[in-house]
Amino acid sequence: MAEPVVRIEGLTYRYRRASEPAIRDIDLTVEAGEVLLVAGPSGCGKSTLIRAINGLIPHAYPGELSGSVRVNGRLTTELRLRDLAAIIGTVLQDPAKQIVGATVEAELAFGPENLGMDRTEIRRRISDVAERAGIRNLLGRETAALSGGERQLLAVGGILMLEPRLYVVDEPLANLDPASAARLLGILRTLADEGHAIVIVEHRVEEALDLRPDRVLYLEEGRTRYLGSVSGFLEIADPDAVKLPFDAVLARFRSDPSLVGTIPAAPGHHAGAAPPGTLAAPGADPAESPRLEFSGVRAGFGDREVLHGIDARLGRREIVAVLGPNGSGKTTLFRTAMRLLKLTGGEIRVDGEPITNRTVAQLASTFGYVFQSPSQMLFARTVREELTFGPRNLGRDPGTFGAIVTDALERTSLDVVEDILDRPPLTLSFGQQKRLALAIALSLEPPTLILDEPSAGQDHRTARRFMREVMAIPGLESIYLVTHDVDLALTHADRILLFREGRVVADGPPLEVVEDTDRWIACNLRPTSLIRANARWSGLNGAFLDAETLAARVATGTAAAP
Amino acid sequence: MNFAPRYLGRGSWLARRDPRVLVIAVVCFVLAAIQVWDLRIMLILDLIAFAYYRTARIPFRQVRRQWMLAILFVSLLVFANGIIASGRIQRLPEGVEPHIYGYIPLLGTPVSAESLTFALVQFLRFLSLIAVGFPIAFAIAPDVFGVTFARLGVPYRFAYAIDLTWRFIPSLAEDFRSTIDAQRVRGMDFTGQSRNPVARVRRQIPVLVPTIVNAIAGAEDTIDAMDLRGFGTGERTWFQDLVLDRTDKLVLIGFGSLLVVATIGGLVTSSSVLWVPDAILPR
Amino acid sequence: MTSMSMPRSMWTVDSRTIVYAAIGAALYGVLVGLFKIPVPGTTAVDARPAFALVPFFGFAFGPVVGLFTGLVGNMIGDQISGWGALTSYNWSIANGVVGLLAGLAPAYLGSMMSGSLGRRAAAGAVGGAIAVVIGFLVVFSDMIKDQMDFNAVLTTEYIPVVIGDLIVTIILVPVLVYAWEPVKERLGR
């Protein structure tokens, strides 16, 4: 048998500044023509493993390495990055960061140029790759103007240009709409069928299975938990740590009834375990004006209109998810409501009053707006200073700051972090920064929270834990979510506003909105296994349940099959 | 806010030139223009500069703001220099005494035919430099900056850094705007005034720190992406081929001659000496 | 066990240097024109908070990055504002020299660099300030380039720009060093 593309033996690696190894005792081979899925929660060592394969470890990350990594039979420690680049192609997580070219052609040419390839050969490959990656229509465009899906395909194209034997793809599905995801997986599958090896890292197992991986490597805390067939993996995988297809979750609950007792308090408030508080009592008084009312709203950036006449009412006491693919105008909707963008037509009212009567700062004491990326706003030297910034700007009484800070930290469970008040915010972990962003919004004591893509940058487990914490915050009246994560929206909201190209195409409770499958697919949203399962067992209580809760009910017979 | 370098001159005669021509032309022109102090010759240079500028076909409406600011700034600079030099005038022909009209009240700065001409030449020179320089930003395709400088002799790593700079501008500008929005919903007010410059600089910390720190932290993946595709590991090619055609060569010869003529002229004629029109001399 | 450590000289030019240089120049080019704060008592020149990028990038990432940030960033700022990248090329050189000198500061401020984060932040301010005072001497070339008067350059250009940029450097460079160093520790390299 031929030498495998990758052969890893007894690999342990510790980063220079770390006290513990990030991965330990890894043994792995990847053969030509094979698709290997690497799964595991954040911090399991996936990224380190990728770097060890593609040579960034040890060439760009100093640290302590034992064991060996061979590519095409040669030790990576003895190869230069220049040589490795021609054998292994890596598609990084965030295509916006991977793309270095100002235009599509420049990006495609980048790798071959660095390797000193002949100009005519580069041009031949550009034409070839544009065809294979299905991006011929993008040629000539500037990369800054591409959509997220287009960028991801271009990033893959940039790697195809080098014609490597092995493709390492890191979480490619994080920001892809189903159409782009299907195209990407199609390209990867073809490569494997042609005899290339593929290593795909993804915790969205349900979606990655569309690639028909041959084997799965499941990592936990830097060690191999499982290495083998897909079916064997689905039997042992932790449904809390990675996102599994519903049938796999159900099978786990059926085979192991003890799991039923482990379900955490229901993530949504539907399931009856909601925290006591105003949020627990949805259903608005019809006489009451809505918290936020859009009538014929138009807005956009410069000459480009993004919202084409939005009519919607968001209640004072409800959880609403604005759901739609990237670029459909969801975020623009709330930025306009916060007066961060100019209204070009129609009217927006807050508690019955036009927003034009209020400043951004005044609106912030009604809506706690949590941006997608927490580090975008952290600047202060301590958490305390960070939390008093808002109240100070709004001219609140400094005598109350102590109480405001304590309250915000308690409501976001940050109070348990040691020395939290004096920590520099940027030294907190990503999860803690996310919660700090939440605490910052709460420091202005708003009755309503607006969360922009709350699951961004988090894995399945941490995203769900974060949502549970948000839903449990006491003293809130309403929560509005902006997301492209279908299951997250459906399992947490009372009501879904479905967005497509700057228009509301559906408005109603989750189960109702998903009924029309054609509309769903037209919105470029993924019909997930959870939607099908909820539809199948919808007789239960009229609510959309998350995978574990539904599986537990089905397994224990509290859900009657149709 | 839109900072994306806009390729406004796309398709124009100038944009079809080898981009090296645009850079070399500016260098020649700048070096020629700074030697000229004869008003008549400066007017000719302005004509050349604006004729050249016209070939880039940059829609005026799109760059009106830039022109206004530039003219305002040039005026201030020239005016301030005139005031502070308080009547001492460079580049006067030997033995000529300034013809003074009068004195500015309070400051006592003399205003003379010579000082006005000097200011006018300075003003016209700046205008010509701006006109010639404009097309570099607006008539060079965004993906050929790197190769342009590389083929002009800049080491390829730095030439590529110039490419990368243009690549980063739109996304960093977008992140910056996002940070401003994030701080505005925390009640930060950007309109407030304070006389104290220290306080006002400190007030920018909440937007500058996240923008800068995030940009640097976000660079890690870009560095990896470059390393993984072998950047900086050896000989590099550029996929765009730059070839000087006949017209390019003629343009280069033209601007080169301009520099030569200005230099020789400065040595053997009075082109680098102030020339004052008789008409404005006080009788 | 293979233990790898890579000594990185101040003058190394690798992907890291190039990316930081490009980010510095892009940020400076974009931000410098955005906010200008008039300094009382001076006429034409303002305190430009974004200028802090030049000494900070030099101080944190070395003289090569500092030079590029100042030089190319200033050219881009001039080009975006319509002034033209080469119209005041000597000012761009001055900005580059400031970045370069700030990048050398860790070498000659050795004792301050080995101390606490607070001392390093102070070193950034001191190194940046020295770089500003020396680097902007380059603008006296306006006396040749534009036949400006010495007093005019001194009073309308050098002194105002140095005062404005010293304020910015002394306030903002330490803040940036404080914010950046803990983040750097977490990046794994």
Image: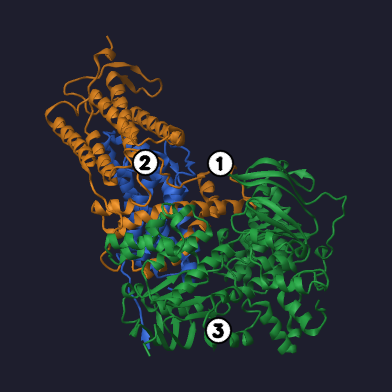
Chain colours: A green, B orange, C blue
Say which amino acid is labelled 3.
Answer: Tyr
- Which quarter of the picture shows residue A15? bottom left
| Residue carrying label 1 | A303
Residue A92, compared with residue B25, is above or below; it is below
**Closest to the observer, B8 or B99:** B8
Give the x, y percent position of residue B25: 25, 40
**Closest to the observer, A419 or B251:** B251
**Circles 2 and 1 on the same subunit:** no
Give the x, y percent position of residue A30: 44, 84
Is any atom of residue C54 visible in this view?
A: no
Of badges 3 and 2, the one in the foreground is: 2
Q: CA distance from mark 3 to mark 1?
A: 49 Å
Is any atom of residue B262 visible in this view?
A: yes
Parent chain of label 2 = B
Parent chain of label 1 = A
- Which quarter of the picture shows residue A317? bottom right
| Residue carrying label 2 | B11
| Residue carrying label 3 | A218
